[in-house]
Image (cartoon, helix red, strand yellow):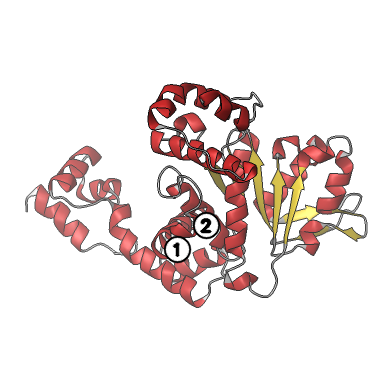
Amino acid sequence: MQTRQLIRHCIETEDKKNPYTDEKIAEILDLSREIVTNIRKELKIPDSRERRKSELHKAILQIIKSQPQISDRQLTKKLNDQYFVIGKYAVSKIRQELTLSKTQNTTSTPIFSHIIGYDGSLKNIINRALAALIYPPFGMHCLYVGQVGTGKSTLIKEVLNYAQTLERYQQHFYCHEINCQDYKHNEKQLLVELFGYQQQAGLLETMNQGIICLNQIDSFPIQGKEMLLKYLNTGQFQRLDNPEIFMSSTMIIATLNTAIEDYQRNFSMVIQLPSFEQRPMKEKLAYIQKCFQNESQCLNDDITVKKKRFILYYPILFLIIFSKFKMKLKSLVLKLY
């Protein structure tokens, strides 16, 4: 039998739940892996991961459908019981992909249509944010990273509004916002408020299965950073001056202006928002138009800018509106005329 036929036969008779890798086929047929890989590609046969995907995804979706709040560990065990050879990390990653796919297919993105870029540069970002929110059983810890003015707070606000429409929040919606920068002169108070103290419960307990927003997490107390990272990874924490271990299912949503590796590595979902410079021209113009609309409402008067003048003064508008200079748009409008 020719080598091509042997490889095809080997793949056709394999266990569909645990397909042979190219290395395994090479071992069985006493061939080099390169030969197996090249012939498999010539035969237009996908690799082992792709061949198993259909069976594996079908099994995962069936389990999640009957047990929406099942943990990744329990899900992995059930798959192993069905003779899938797969670990918890791979199961968690596939589950995230399926959740994101479900969000893209079933969630109507236009609910964020008033956000500039909802159908452009922010489309995938919004879908990822919603996927983290609906990830079973109680959401996925999510970190928003972006420069000042990229819209982190606006997007989080809309995500939290959407959260209140979810079935698990229909009766009780627990949400609390903390600006870590506000505690820079009393860092212990932030740790007490979040984790608790001795016999006093903190927000992680009182807000269990809810959402806590930690803004400017780069200002989080250094002495409490290890406690926070432990919670993000295990769901476990301790109150200050109390050795007892507590558990919580509270989802953490945090914001950062600049990337910090320790936090990015420990959050399950990291969302990077584009800077204004990275936005397409269509969205930049929409931002300027929105600035004029907002100023028009403040002045309670119409503002008209002729097209020729707008093009002429566009570089000036760009510098003034989106730079750090705090010049009122009213003065800018007067200069245009």
Judge by depth and name the residue closer to the eye, 143 or 38.
143
Question: How many numbered callouts?
Answer: 2
Which amino acid does the dot numbered 2 rest on?
Leu
- Determine which quarter of the picture holds residue 200: bottom right
Q: Is residue 77 above or below residue 216?
A: below
Q: Which residue is mark 2?
A: 130
Measure how far apart labels 2 and 1 are at the Cα level: 8 Å
Circles 2, 1 touching at the beta carbon (< 8 Å)? yes
Give residue 65's position: percent from left, percent from top: 47, 74
Residue at 88%, 35% in the rendered image: 185
Q: Which mark is residue 240?
A: none
Judge by depth and name the residue closer to the eye, 50 or 64.
64
Residue at 50%, 55% in the rendered image: 112
Local packing at callout 2 (Cα closer than 10 Å; few below 14, some 14-19, many 20+) is many
Q: Is residue 107 above or below residue 309?
A: below
Give residue 241's position: percent from left, percent from top: 92, 50
Judge by depth and name the residue closer to the eye, 92 or 30.
92
Residue at 21%, 43% in the rendered image: 37
Judge by depth and name the residue closer to the eye, 109 or 58.
109
Q: Is residue 337 above or below residue 237?
A: above
Give residue 141's position: percent from left, percent from top: 62, 52
Which of the marked residues, 2 or 1, is nearer the chain's N terminus? 1
Residue at 69%, 65% in the rendered image: 209
Which amino acid does the dot numbered 1 rest on?
Thr
Q: Which mark is residue 107?
A: 1
